[in-house]
Amino acid sequence: MENILLVIIVFITSILFSMLGIGGAVFYVPFLYGTGMELLSAITTALLLNIVTSGSAAMLYLRKKMVDLQVAVPLILFAAIGTQIGGYIARLTPVNVLLLIFSIQMLFIGTEMLFARFEKFYRGKEISGKKKKILIVIGGFVIGILSGLLGVGGGSFVVPMLIVLGYGVKFAAATSGFVVVFASLAAFLAHVWTWEPDVTLVIYIIVASFLGAQIGSRLMYSRIKAETLRKILGVMLLVMAARILSGLF
């Protein structure tokens, strides 16, 4: 029964996260950890779900030409370097410290998703030239470190950064989703050698994640406003961050 519920939750959340271009690990890590899974195992499983969810959604976004490859490729390259560093640090860091960092990240991202301060501040502005290249290099590296350290694909940071660069919400989410596939893959490879999964369960949630993302990507492209879903996600992240912090103090 618990496994069936988990599969259903993964399916539903994959629909939501595929629309937002953030993979979903920012939700899956604390959720899986809360089910009794070890933190590093939860991180590895969440990264796998990130790869499946974002990869499934990226199939449509690439066909619809919603992904800016000129920005995505360098982000992926520098994120791949950062993930190996983050993965190494994660194995040396106490669980409570990782959870504290993760909850702070969730508070920041949840607030941004809810109020869209970056988007409001940078709306109508565009960073280009050398400043844009520097931001992409630094952003990719930082995203990679956070991906390896916290088990997130980095999409929750990529989307605000792309908005700063002048992208609309939907194109930012689509490009972010493409970046998340490869950032998550690099982080997954940094963690997978310590992973001892329930193979049957993993197969079920992979299928659920793939199908959910197929539905979500089509809804995002044609029908549902990403802004509405982003606000729902913001509330969800703030509540989960508060739950983690309450358990730490």
Image (cartoon, rainbow, N blue to C red):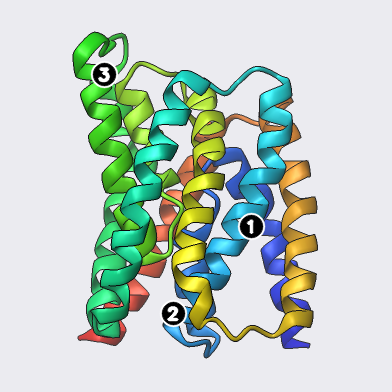
Amino acid carrying mark 2 in the image: Leu
Amino acid at the residue labelled 1: Thr
Q: Earlier in the sequence, mark 2 or mark 3?
A: 2
Residue at left 43%, top 82%? 39
Q: 26 and 95: which one is in front? A: 95
Compared to 63, does 216 lie above or below? below
Distance between mark 3 and mark 1 Cα atoms: 32 Å
Let me know if residue 238 appears in the view.
no
Q: Residues within 10 Å of mark 1 (few under 14, many from 20)?
A: many
Q: Alpha carbon of mark 1 to alpha carbon of mark 2: how far?
A: 21 Å
Q: Which tag, 3 or 1, sits closer to the chain's start?
A: 1
Indicate the quadrant where residue 185 lies.
Answer: bottom right
Q: Position of residue 62 (x, y in %)?
A: 67, 25
Select label 3 or label 1 by which is in front: 3
Q: Which mark is residue 40?
A: 2
Q: Amino acid at mark 3?
A: Lys
In this picture, is 85 found above or below 193? above
Q: CA distance from mark 2 to mark 3?
A: 34 Å
Q: Can you give x and y, in whole percent of width and height, for residue 135 in the image?
A: 24, 28
Query: Regarding mark 3 in the picture, which secondary structure is present there?
Result: helix
Determine which residue is flagged by label 3: 132
Pointer 1: what residue? 13
Confirm or deny contact between disc 2 and disc 3 (CB under 8 A): no
Side of 27 where 112 appears, left or right: left
Query: In the image shown, does 209 or 199 lie closer to the viewer?
Result: 199
Residue at 70 percent across and 19 percent down: it is 64
Which type of secondary structure does the marked residue at label 2 adopt? helix
Q: Secondary structure at mark 1?
A: helix
Q: Residue at x 32, y 79 (%)?
A: 91
Q: Position of residue 102 (x, y in %)?
A: 31, 66
Q: Which residue shows up at 44% across the image and 66% down it?
A: 190
Q: Quadrant of residue 1?
A: bottom right
